[in-house]
Amino acid sequence: MILNVSPGMKIWGVIAEINKKDLVISLPGGLRGLVRACEAFDPDLDIETKDADSSFLSRTFRVGQLVSCIVLDLDADNKEKGNHKIWLSLRLALLYKGFTLDAIQEGMVLTAYVKSIEDHGYILSFGLPSFVGFLPKNDRTESRDDKVVGQLLQGVVRSIDRSRKVIYLSSDHDAVSKCVTKDVKGISIDLLIPGMMVNARVLSTLENGLILSFLTYFTGTVDIFNLENAFPTTEWKDHYGKNKKVSARILFLDPSTRAVGLTLNSHLLQNEAPPSLVKTGDIFDRAKIVRVDRGAGLLIEIPSVPVSTPAYVCISDVADNKAQKLDKQFQEGSNVRVRVFGFRHLEGLAIGVLKGSAFEGSVFTHSDVKPGMTVKAKILAVDIFGAIVQLTSGVKALCPLPHMSEFEIAKPGKKFNVGAELVFRVLGVKSKRITVTHKKTLVKSKLPVLSSYAEATDGLVTHGWITKIEKHGCFVRFYNGVQGFVPRSQLGLEPGRDTSTTYHVGQVVKCRVTSSLPASRRINLSFLITPRRASEDEIVSLGSLVCGVVEQVTHRGVIVLVNANAKGTISTDHLADHHEQASLMKSALKPGYKFDQLLVLDTEGENLVLTAKYSLVNSSQQLPLEISQISPYSIVQGYICNLKSGCFVRYLGRLTGFCPRSKAIDDQRNDVSEAFYVGQSVRSKILDVNGETGRITVSLKQSSCASTDTSFIQSYFLLEDKIAKLQMADSKCSEVWTENFGIGSIVEGKIHEAKEFGVVVSFEKYDDVFGFAPHYQLGGNDVETGTVVRAVVLDVSRLERVVDLSLKPEFVTRFKDSSDILPHKKKRKREANKELELHQTVNAVVEIVKEKENYMVLSLPEYNHAVGYASLTDYNIQKLPKKQFVNGQSVTATIMALPSPSTVGRLLLLLKSIGEAETSSSKRAKKKSGYNVGALVQAEITDIKPLELRLKFGVGFHGRVHITEATDGAAAEDPFRNLRIGQTLTARIVAKADKYEKNWKSHQWELSIRPSMLTDSNEIRDKLTPVAFNFSIGQSVTGYVYKVDCQWVWLTVSREVRAQIFFLDTSCEPDELQDLQKQFSVGKSVRGHILSINKEKRLLRLVLRPLSTIPNGNETIEDQSNDNVIENVFSLIREGSVVGGRISKVLPGVGGLLVEIGPHLYGKVHFTELTDSAPDPLLGYREGQFVKCKVLEVSPTGRGTVHVDLSLRFGDDVTSLRDRVDKIEDLQPNMIVKGYVKSVTPKGCFISLSRKLDAKILLSNLSDGFIESPEKEFPVGKLVIGKVLSVETLSRRVEVTLKMSSGSGALKAQMNDTSSLRVGDIISGSIRRVESYGLFITIDHTTLVGLCHISELSDDSVDSIESKYKAGERVKAKILKVDNERHRISLGMKNSHFGDDIEIQTPSKLTSDEDEGDKEEGEGEEVVDRNGQMDNTHKPNSDHQSQVEEFPVLAQVESRASILPLEVSLDDIEQADMDVAVSWTEEHAAVADTKDEKSKRRAKRKQKEDRELEIIAAEQRLLEKDMPRSAEEFEKVIRGSLNSSFVWIKYMAFMLSLADVDKARAIAERALKTINIREETEKLNVWVAYLNLENEYGNPPEEAVVKIFQRALQYCDPKKVHLALLAMYQRTEQHKLANELLDKMTKKFRHSCKVWLRRVQSLLKQHQDGVQAIVNRAVLSLPRHKHIKFISQTAILEFKCGVPDRGRSFFEGILREYPKRTDLWNIYLDQEIRLGDVNMTRALFERAISLSLKLRKMEPLLKKYLEFEKTVGDEERIEYVKKAALEYAKTNLGIETED
């Protein structure tokens, strides 16, 4: 028996179950394993995992099949022993790992997959690529069954073709079962496979089995359940003497422990699984006891048929009470009653139970549970999804949350108590998953249980529960997944009642089966248990016409009373054929209104479903009720009932046809859901009728279903008349007015108002009726307000009381006597109707197009201008775009109905091809009616956009008016403000739309409404010619804003010309630059001056201010070369001008700022030009900030670029101390000057007095006292005040001294003057001495010392002042009192003195009223590392790097910088020389406190220590921000910045400065718990600081760092954490740990280019070999798309810090593969140029320009070559390059022309 299963173990098993996604394997010892579908076959079989479903597994495998498996994994869940899931694999590649062709011998038994089926046999796969197998079909055994691809089969090796590496097998079952593995000398355990039969001999017997020896070298064990005899008695050992020879098969083997299990089972020896003759739950009354094992159990013989089955009963299952002394209770040979509890399929052994409780109850196992049975169960757990319950036999079930109660319960835990026993009813059993219900109605129901579709007989009444509610009915669920449907007619609802208001999901209902189709799994139900029988008089047949009276109007429709005793419902959509009229009709209906004709569509119980649609009522006789009444290819009227996956067309009853999407509309680009709506009337063409399935397929395409009559428009006019009458009845208005306004009659009225689109006519007799005549109907008459006119009525809108009129002479003057209106009307009708005949084709002219009402008014000139009406749309195309018609257009129509009451007195016409596809003839006609450029058109505005008007004109033509074509002269602000949609304009066509424009399809023509373009002069033709692109530098142009992005404001100057304004050129004020989007809204008019011109792109660059100079006169600039760029800069920027800028980089140290002032143009602000002599000039500046700059100097550089010096100082100087010293002539000896430390040497330091003037200070002049370390006391960037000693004008040398003794009286007075201090000021300083009565504090920038008494230290009492404060500590204080006579200053440090806002002031600030607060140059500190340095890894900005290359001066400044801001950087760093660490100076607060004034030596020592502390404090004032100086202040800051890692890290550094490492660790832990989980970057910063802390103070550091590292991996991005740890190791020179970490990273993140580059960088830094090997590994690991990036970056690293020749090799390798990648050539050339080998660089340039590339790709390389020669070459080389460029251009242009 297997005691320990481990991954890699090989086991023999038998398939017990085949599920949908896995196989269940029965293993030795009663274990069960799972094989996922993807692990059931080898990948080389090309079988998709998604196809490995249940059908595939069931075709390939069978229950009872013996298989060899290998253990993949064990479940890691903390479950009980024996319940772990064992994941197995059947892959032969794992099972036969280590097999070779030489190890295979003839006669061996091998397992193989069927890889493919050929004509003569099967190609087999063993999972190994080294050989394949073949099984011939002529083998007589192959007739037994057919093989499928992927099937596992066993075969005996018959022969081996070693040359072709093919193994020939035979699958004869007898041969396979009798084949014994030969004893081969030196056989390995890896070649042993479970299932192999071996010859063995007995070595010894055990209490529970045997030990056998086989194959000479191996031993194996056989447990007692795998003996040859299935019923071994107590004397079984007597049958197995020592050295007895037996045949055995391998059950399992563990290569790691070399443990082997064997079996002697007779069935397994025959290579067959033992039979399963008993089932779980079976009870046997006379089972015979074969053997009694004391303390273990009983072996029992079960009398199964045809042979007995062995069973074993464990001692725990013998009795309900604890069983003792089994040999006394049970005798061998006696009979017992046993119940089968389980079965071991591999051993053929049943597991039995003798407990009395096992025979009680109806449920013992899952198989005993039946749907519908009631059970008692105990509640085990309650969760949000339901309750887990346990039946009395131990079987578990789930009670879902909806079934825990009749009603929805919010807190199921209160209703269901764990441990309570309740009664449930079984809902269903599926794959051992049992679900139960506790709904009281279901549990106590006495009605029959419906658990299968076969049980659903007509009339059966049962209980179920609602699972889904639809508009057309409800779905009801029963037991075992049976489901039925209740149509709305059987719900028992009152008319107009909504289904969802009566029933709810989960409700238990009693229902009756009305019909069922078990084969189709369909059941029709009814909630009407005893339906009422209707009398013969009440029965209304479907399809009959009835009348009804409105009883009630609801939101769903109208309820009517039919035949005085039946009720019916008309839904809103069924009130009209037209969607818009349905809602109008519903709003007009009132109770009591009578419908003369309604069609009965369907019945819902006792309720009738009716329709008032004219189309359905009119065709009621042709509507089908049954499928037999439908004939193919007929046209049938119907309506849309559903739009899911197509269109469902309903006829009478439930008869429905389906229209696929492809048959719904002619234009497949339209969506079906947008082309139709539910309830729409349609005409359908029957395509197919299937009587067997009852399916009807129809088509709704307009091309085959177009109307052949005018019923569609006729129904519109009839219903409009009804609605008008209903509304007049409500308002009690008279209908007499309509009689005097008959169609075609002449009326007299007065012009009431003249509008842009026509005239409004009023009538004397009818104040509330108005007439309207559009311009087209005026007939050229000039009409004025008040004029009396005679007009002909073309149309009447009764609802709106509006009459459409025509004043055309052909209408008005066609009668002889125009004085008598009505007689002439009758006469005209008689004359017209005399000649008109039905179905006659006539020519008509469009008079009025009514798009809203979907019809148009036509006139028939040949028939005395008779007026007719035609529809613009049809039943099936109501929602589709309509065909466009214009006034005056000629059309052809057919007369379908003459004027009569049924047509409301109108002549109805049917247009040809309404809604049909456009024919070729119509296209030709449309083409003939086209327009030419220059034509004047009348166009209607359809849309107004900020930059254009959209217009329509003619027959379906569309155009636009660009905003620059709206007015003449200067651009007006919002030229479209006086226009509106619908207005008609006169416009001229100026051009055809550009097909390459983005939205060119939306318009066909470019129009203009400029007054100058609308004149009839001959100059128009000249204006229509394309305007030449003729602009000059400095010219003023105007455009309209059409887009604003992050850097540019884009303008449109004309239709073809665009312009752009750089965002920094729009203003010099930072506030205005910040709100660029608000300042430049789309459509705004902007005027600017041209700075540069791009003729190719037709693009201008503008600036808002005039240019100071115009380069090259007025010539245009087509080529933006370097010279032109420089000229443009000089024309835009000059000394003294004020410009806007954006800080691109805050340079470290005294580098100053790099400010962007234009596209690719940067200026430098020197450190001395930031502010007027502040201690920290960089304070308040950040990257991305907008600033106002003054240009100091603009000068060209030797590299073809421009150098710009800027200043941010705009204030006037107040005192001589702040006077600028720009020239050396301004300096005089003994002058007091200020400067910033620029660099420090052992001999002194240099200070910057201005951007062009430096001074030196000798070491002896730095201080009055001794200076031990000038670098510490005078860090770079420190502000110093000194006196000029000497000035040498010619050599530009200036020497300054900082000695106080040599300073002037003014300087001394300033540093010691107490009069500059004011009571109430807040100052900063450092503690000079700590006494028991208070603190002596040195005030910054002075030599003054103040006393803070102990009573003023804190609002709370201070117990021990010495323990809380130490000398040298930085503090803030408030001046309480100043005694100028005694030179005493009283200070206070209580929090109540400061309030919320603390502003630190220094004496220099008090005198100048300027902000000179102490700030450090960086942004903070980090935890110290092992070498006393901070973890401050800085990543260079690539943009800044390119800027530095343009300005060499900036590069020099950066090289001298040494102070960087705080950053916990995790980014990958490619350049090792950019890693700079900030040195950390620890403060030691061990100042001896002494009061012995008699000892001069001790006093002198203390004075020296105080002086050193003052110097340290002064240094840190310049290096640190004004951060909190005590724990209380830090806590206050943290409360306002909980998610700021910067504050937390400063707090940690503060605690480390106090040597409190444990407190720093506690702060780190607090930070990790406090910072929000979403702030990943902030948390990561704290983790990195924590790592540095443990690296310095951990005990031991390596273990402490690893622990923190493992914790950080659980919360942060693993890759970033690894990179941070690697950076720390490399910075602290722990190369061994760094290399070990890199090895792990290259395995864990093998797809990361960044990690491999770090590996290469590490090797190059340590000057180690092996780069090529790393590159080879990386190329194999990285995805292909990252190869170029990795190899090119590696080559750059080789050039910079490795061997350049290796870098060249890398570049040459990738260029051989990608020779036309100009980006790679540029990188290669840049590295060679940087290296400085001129000859090598020139050779590379020559290779590059010899490539065959397009000119636009070669142009950058040629320019780079020219710039290179300008730098290092002479005039001859420059001319050579220019000549080569011209030749290349000529050659390339010639080739392109030929192409």
Image (spheres, helix red, strand yellow):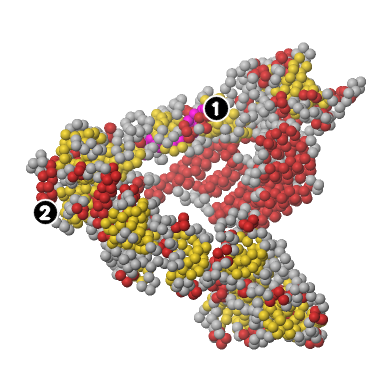
Percent from the top left, x then y, of residue 237? 80, 84
Residue 1467 visible to an observer of this rendering: no
Marks 2 and 1 in Cβ contact (< 8 Å): no
Between 1604 and 964, the residue placed more toward the observer is: 1604
Is residue 82 found inside the magenta-colored segment of the image?
no
Q: CA distance from mark 2 to mark 1?
A: 88 Å
Residue 1596 visible to an observer of this rendering: yes
Q: Secondary structure at mark 2?
A: helix
Percent from the top left, x then y, of residue 1519? 71, 31
Q: Secondary structure at mark 1?
A: strand
Disc 2 crowd, CA 10 A, few/some/many (<14, 14-19, 20+): few
Q: Name the quadrant containing residue 1233.
A: top right
Between 749 and 1676, the residue placed more toward the observer is: 749
As displayed, is residue 342 above or below residue 1552?
A: below
Percent from the top left, x then y, of residue 996? 37, 46
Residue at image x 79%, y 35%? 1554
Is residue 1062 found inside the magenta-colored segment of the image?
yes
Between 925 and 181, the residue placed more toward the observer is: 925
Q: Can you tell which mark lies on residue 1784? A: none
Give the mark toward the camera: 2 or 1.
2
Residue identifier under label 2: 835
Which tag, 2 or 1, sits closer to the chain's start?
2
Percent from the top left, x then y, of residue 1117? 42, 34
Say which amino acid is labelled 1: Lys
Residue at image x 15%, y 49%? 866
Q: Which residues are magenta?
A: 1049-1069
Say which amino acid is labelled 2: Glu
Residue at image x 39%, y 57%? 495
Residue identifier under label 1: 1188
